Image: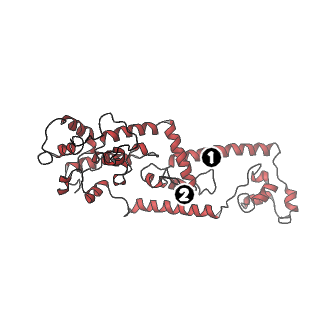
Amino acid sequence: MSAKGSIAEVYEKTGKCEYSVYGNPCAWKETMAYCESLRGKPMGCPWYCNKEELYCAARYLNPSYSWPDKIGIVPTGKCTGKDKYHCCSWQLDARYDAKCDPMNWNFVANEKKKKHCRAHAFSRSCNYYYDAALKIYEAKQGSAGGKKAHDANCVKSLAFHSCSPFKEPFLGDGYCKSGCGQMSERDGQSGMADSYKNDNGCCDTYAMLVKKKAMADKAEQAKKDAAIANGSCKDDPEGLVKDKDWGAGYKCADNKASGYCEYAYVDDMKKYCAATCKLCGAATPTLAATPEQLEATAKSMQLVAERMRSRKNGDPNEPSALVQKYLVEGYPDLPELNRA
C-alpha cells in the first residue's frame, strides 16, 4: 500500500506532508472538525461508514473510553495515566520508537522531522496534543534561551569532532566547514542518535565560533604588535648564535621563512626570535595531540565520512518510513484496514 495512484499522492508530492494510510495529515484540522461534528451521532462503524468516520470512531468517538486528545489539551511530555496506550506522549514517543513528542526534543528539529511527526501524530490520533506541543516547542526554540541552548549543544558537538577553533586538536576550516552539516547537535552527548538527521547540524554555531576566534586573534595580534613597537618584545640574536644547537649560521628571519615559528622549534623561537615570530607573551602553540585525542578525532572523521556516504548513496539500514512499519505490524486500532 502506498500513496501512488491515490489522492494522497497529490499532497505527498507537494512536500508538505508525509503519506498516512489513515488520511491526509495536512488536513488534520479539517479532519478533527469533522470528528467533532459527529459527536453524539449514531454511526455504523466499522461496517457502514466512510474512511473519515472510521478514523473518528476508532479513538475520538469510541464510547468504551475517553480518548485524551481533546481541544485545549495541555501537553506535558509525560505519561501519568494507568494505561500508556491511552497516553499521547507515549504514543508519540515510544510507539514505533518514533520520538515525536516535541516536549521531549532537546535539539532544534528540522522541517523534515516536524513533517514526519505530524504524520505520526495523525496516525496515533494525537492531533491536538502534537499541535499544542509543537507550538510550545517552537516558541521555546525561537527565544534567546533556545538559541543559547542550541549553541551550547553545538559547541560540545564541534569539540567532539575536533572542530572547535578554540580547542586542540582543531582539524582546520576546510574539513570543519564541509563537515559541520553532518555533525548533529547532540553529538558527544546523550540523545546523539535521536538528533542526527532530525536537526539542522551545527554550521551556524561553527561560523559564529570562527568569527569569535578571528576577533580574539586580532586582539591578540594587536597586543603583540604593540609589544614589538615599544620594545618589550624583541629578538635575542646573540643568544641564538651562542646556543650550541643553533650557532652563527642561523638568523631569525631565515628561521621564520623555514617555518620554525609554527612547528618543531617553537619553544626556541619564542626564546630567541619572539619579535620576528610574533610569539611575544603568547602561550606556545602546538600541533601535538595526545593519543586519546587522536583516537577521538579518527572516530569523529570516520563517523562524518559514514554520514556523508549514507546521504550520497542511500543507507540500506535507514529506518523505514512510518507507513512501512504500519504495513508490517498492522493496524490494531483499525483492523478493517488490514484487509486493504
Q: Quadrant of residue 264?
A: bottom right
Q: Position of residue 70 (x, y in %)?
A: 29, 37
Q: Quadrant of residue 24?
A: top left
Instruction: Describe the element under mark 2 as helix, strand or loop.
Output: helix
Q: Nearer the viewer, residue 8 or 134?
A: 134
The quarter of the displayed image where residue 176 is located: bottom right
- Say which residue label 2 marks: 175
Q: Is residue 19 left or right of residue 81?
A: left
Q: Residue at x 13, y 38 (%)?
A: 42
Mark 1 lies on a secondary structure that is helix
Q: In this rendering, would 291 be left or right of 333?
A: right
Residue type, numbered disc 2? Tyr
In the picture of the structure, the residue carrying the numbered disc 1 is 213
Give the position of the C terminus as an image quadrant: bottom left
- Residue 33 lies, with reference to residue 195, above or below; the image says above
Give the label on residue 54, or none.
none
Q: Amino acid at mark 1?
A: Lys
Give the mark, 2 or 1, whose residue is nearer the N terminus: 2
* Disc 1 crowd, CA 10 A, few/some/many (<14, 14-19, 20+): some
Residue 173 seen in the current view: no
Asked if the residue at tag 1 contacts the one at tag 2, i.e. Cβ–Cβ closer than 8 Å, the answer is no
- Answer yes or no: is residue 274 visible: yes
